[in-house]
Image (cartoon, helix red, strand yellow):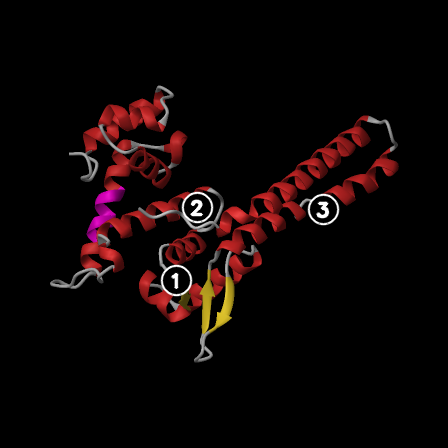
Amino acid sequence: MPGGRLTQAERQQIAVGLADGLAYAEIARRLSRPTSTITREVTRNGGPTGYRADLAHRATQQRTHRRKQAAPQGTKAPAQPHGRDAEAVHEYQEMLTTVLMTSGLPKMMARVLGCLYTTDSGRLTASELAQRLKVSPASISKAIAFLENLDLVRRERDERRRERYVVDDDLWYQSMIRSARANDQFIATARQGINILGRGTPAANRLENAARFLDFVSEALIRAAEQGREVLYTRAETS
């Protein structure tokens, strides 16, 4: 049924749809499922070129079995604020983690970022992250160091001098600027090679064109980030 777990037959239909080159939205329409369900299913199980219905179904059964073993009988998921459905929040956090992994983040780093983004405060201590994700503090420390290096997380100290790890609106801007500036070293190095290889030669032209392209794209990205920065501080209207 729509909203329930995917059946093996539905997974086989997904595999057929992918083989036929159908978009996720079209596969979802044929199954009467949300597009996000199909996106999460495919990205979690090998992507559009590696998806296998039988393997995906088995992997889901194994994950469900592990969760049941890990949760003591008679316990429930912690209550969520604002009347949220705890299971729905958990499923969404997994989907967000999968999307972050697809964009290039390692699994643990994606899990930490997903966990932070799905808390209202956007800030948690290392022990809180370890408890929520059921991993060791060392794993959290390694993930935070990686995310800090990408300007995706920052540290702050609370009134009790405890370190908290934070995601906030400005980090998107800072990360975008960092991404744009990451091209600067290649641009400078490419231009050094033009005279060495001989201006006008095929190799020099290739480097010059690459440098000009990246320079143009980087500057355009920085301008767009500056112009769009105010969007990050615009509060959505509530009904």
At x 41%, y 69%, the residue is 125
Q: Amino acid at mark 3?
A: Asp
Which residue, given by chain and number where applicable, does mark 1 sit on?
121
Q: Which residues are magenta?
A: 59-66
For residue 239, above or below residue 8: below
Is label 1 or label 2 in front?
1
Q: Nearer the viewer, residue 220 or 197?
A: 220
Q: Residue at x 33, y 39 (%)?
A: 40
Q: Residue furthest left?
A: 74
The residues bearing labels 2 and 3 have C-alpha atoms spaced at a distance of 26 Å
Residue 83 locus on image (x, y percent): 22, 56
Residue 55 in picture, x, y percent from top left: 28, 37
Furthest residue toward top: 20
Q: Is residue 49 toward the left or the right of residue 86 in the image? A: right
Q: Tell me if label 2 and label 3 are in contact, CB under 8 Å.
A: no
Q: Which residue is mark 2?
A: 101
Q: Is residue 225 above or below residue 143?
A: above
The amino acid at mark 2 is: Met
SS at mark 2 in the image: helix
Q: How many marks?
A: 3
Mark toward the start of the polypeptide (3 vs 1): 1
**Residue ID for mark 3:** 184
Q: Earlier in the sequence, mark 1 or mark 2?
A: 2
The location of residue 70, given as percent across then percent down, is: 22, 60
Mark 1 → mark 2, Cα distance in angstroms: 23 Å
Q: Secondary structure at mark 1?
A: loop
Splitting the image into 4 quarters, where does residue 54 fall? top left
